[in-house]
Image (cartoon, grey):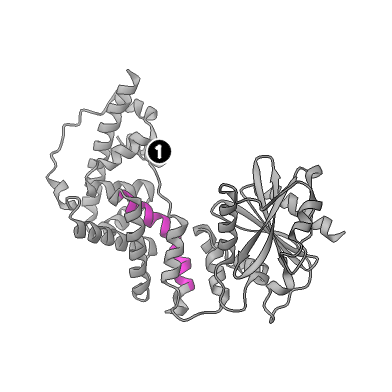
Amino acid sequence: MTANRPRFEATVLPHLDAAFNLACWLLHDDQAAQDVVQDACLRAWRFFDSLRGESVKPWLLSIVRHACFDYLRARKHEPLPMDEEEEDERPDDAAGPQELLLARVRREQVDQAIRALPWAFREAIILRELEALPYEDIARITDVPMGTVMSRLSRARKLLRQSLSGLGEEQAS
Amino acid sequence: MKQTDDELGALLREKASYHTAPTALRQAILKDIAPAAPQKSGWRWLDVLRPGAPWLASGFAAGMLALWLVQPMLAARPAADMTALLLDSHLRSLQVDHLTDVQSTDQHTVKPWFAGKLDYTPPVRDFAAQGFPLAGGRLEVLQGRTVAVLVYRHRLHWINMFVQPAATATTSATPVTTATAPRQLPSQRGFQLVQWQGDGMQYTLLSDLNGPELMQLAAISSGAAAR
């Protein structure tokens, strides 16, 4: 194990920011995110030997995501990510000139809009837009088929656009 | 539609909060994966000198250099993290009334103040003419050794200069007696560190001042020491 330590530090720890960012966005709690990521890294360290030829970032992030699940399950905090599929499709009435107002939106409003997304949409959008991961990596991390990732992303974008366009409009008037 | 997706993506990347991992978390993880048995102190050192991810990829050689530079500060047994100790001391010193034990811009007041409190005499100089006025001095206990700290000011920044004998600070196996030019160590939590040796002393500057200006003080000070 000891011999692996430099390799662990060189391959896994560079993704610590991504791990922490994901945990913060999933848990909405910095302190909990620290505990969970620390725990996840310990898990990753224990299973480091079993990592073969896989790319490290999605591997670590899937461990972090599981650790977030466990944390929430233990606290029965937030409805677990299944329920989002029941969400109704809303008419796509937010497209159009309002889009132009996105530029006016402030940081807190962007954060708020992402926070308001259901879990599955939120994790998809964080992994895609903030971590720039390819669809297949997101599919692996979130344990769903690629098609589901794409539809979640598109619905997440629609929801974001709706809430952010509304804000831009309020500010403009 | 595609274009607005890209625009939305750009907006998120630009404006959504990105939560970077706190140093405490990084250190907790490094501690978790540290072997239970005490190891060569060298590895502990590399750990703490790695401030961030980009470093991990490219910084091994720099880490070895830093290790070599801080070697004199290592105790013989696996040492606690000296850079972190220095930084903690620096931060503590900035809290109310901790900065200076002897507050004077006069080197002839500060220098005698150290006499009798240490088993060595730190060179005390004022560099007000070069823009770094002496503000005072204090004592710190680091790893069981009493260490002199000189406090300088530059504009609104405070600079702590830790001075300790290079020969006694080093392990007996690797005596370091030669002078070394000032070098910047990897910054820690946004603070800059510069270290050099001369006059048989090891000097470490620590400040939130930018690197080049801190190097300037190091150059002035090490130059003055050489004379």
- Tell which residue pokes out farthest to the front in this image: B116
Q: Nearer the viewer, residue B178 or B58?
A: B178
Residue at 28% over, 58% down: A65
Q: Kindly identify which chain the residue marked by label 1 belongs to.
A: B
Q: Nearer the viewer, residue B176 or B17?
A: B176
Residue B216 pos. (x, y %): 74, 49
Residue B11 pos. (x, y %): 38, 37
Residue at 14% over, 49% down: A83
B35 displayed left or right of B73: left
Residue type, numbered disc 1: Lys
Tag 1, which secondary structure? helix
Q: Quadrant of the N terminus of chain B?
A: top left
Residue at 53% over, 72% down: B44
Residue B183 seen: yes
The span shown in magenta is A6-25
Residue B218 pos. (x, y %): 74, 54
Secondary structure mostly seen in the magenta stretch: helix
B162 displayed left or right of A42: right
In the rendered view, tell whether residue A49 sits above or below residue A107. below
In the rendered view, tell whether residue A138 sits above or below residue A43. above
In the rendered view, tell whether residue A11 sits above or below residue B18. below
Residue B60 pos. (x, y %): 58, 67
Dividing the picture into quadrants, the one containing residue B15 is top left
Q: Quadrant of the C terminus of chain B?
A: bottom right
In the rendered view, tell whether residue B78 sits above or below residue B90. below
Residue at label 1? B15
Task: Inspect the magenta stretch and tell me whether residue A17 lies in it.
Answer: yes
Q: Nearer the viewer, residue A44 or B176?
A: B176
Q: Nearer the viewer, residue A53 or A142?
A: A142
